[in-house]
């Protein structure tokens, strides 16, 4: 999922568990569905969009996704490297790096 309002990339706890990665620290976040800051584990990862393109050295946060089936939320930490175009009438987007 792409979230232009999210400062950081977020990983679903199930994905973190499946990958078996270890946290490198914690981060406090506030979400639209919380009233107080949550302390979440932070991970140092690389994000592969294809075999030929990877965004390296991303600090992703592990946080619940509120029951939605997303594995990862792409935040502005990665989006700042790209041009995002949204074609509303077609409900399509492109992401160019």
Image: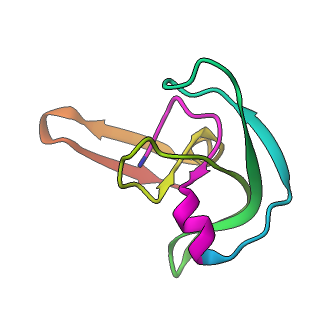
Q: Is residue 40 above or below residue 4?
A: below
**Residue placed at 80% from the left, 61% from the top?**
23
The answer to whether residue 6 is left or right of residue 96 is right
Camera-nearest residue between 39 and 61 = 39
User: Extreme right residue here?
Assistant: 25
Q: Which residues are magenta?
A: 2-18
**Residue placed at 72% from the left, 72% from the top?**
21
Residue 70 at x, y percent in the picture: 40, 54
Camera-nearest residue between 8 and 21 = 21
Camera-nearest residue between 40 and 1 = 40
User: Extreme bottom residue here?
Assistant: 51
The structure's colour scheme is: rainbow
Magenta-span inclusion, residue 50: no
Residue 64 at x, y percent in the picture: 54, 46
Residue 50 at x, y percent in the picture: 48, 75
Q: Is residue 91 above or below residue 24?
A: above
User: Extreme top residue here?
Assistant: 35
Residue 48 at x, y percent in the picture: 56, 71
Magenta-span inclusion, residue 4: yes
**Residue placed at 56% from the left, 28% from the top?**
31
**Residue placed at 20% from the left, 33% from the top?**
88
- State how many labels appear: 0
Q: Is residue 33 above or below residue 59?
A: above
Q: Is residue 33 above or below residue 13?
A: above
Quadrant location of residue 52? bottom right
The answer to whether residue 67 is left or right of residue 63 is left
């Amino acid at each position: 999922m792409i979230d232009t309002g999210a400062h950081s990339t977020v990983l679903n706890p199930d994905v973190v568990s499946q990958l078996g990665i270890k946290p490198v620290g914690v981060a406090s976040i506030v979400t639209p569905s919380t009233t107080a800051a949550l302390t979440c584990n932070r991970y140092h990862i690389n994000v592969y969009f294809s075999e030929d393109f990877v965004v390296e050295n991303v600090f992703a946060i592990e946080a619940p996704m509120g029951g939605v089936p997303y594995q990862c939320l792409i935040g502005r930490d990665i989006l700042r490297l790209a041009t995002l175009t949204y074609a509303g009438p077609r409900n399509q987007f492109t992401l160019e790096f």
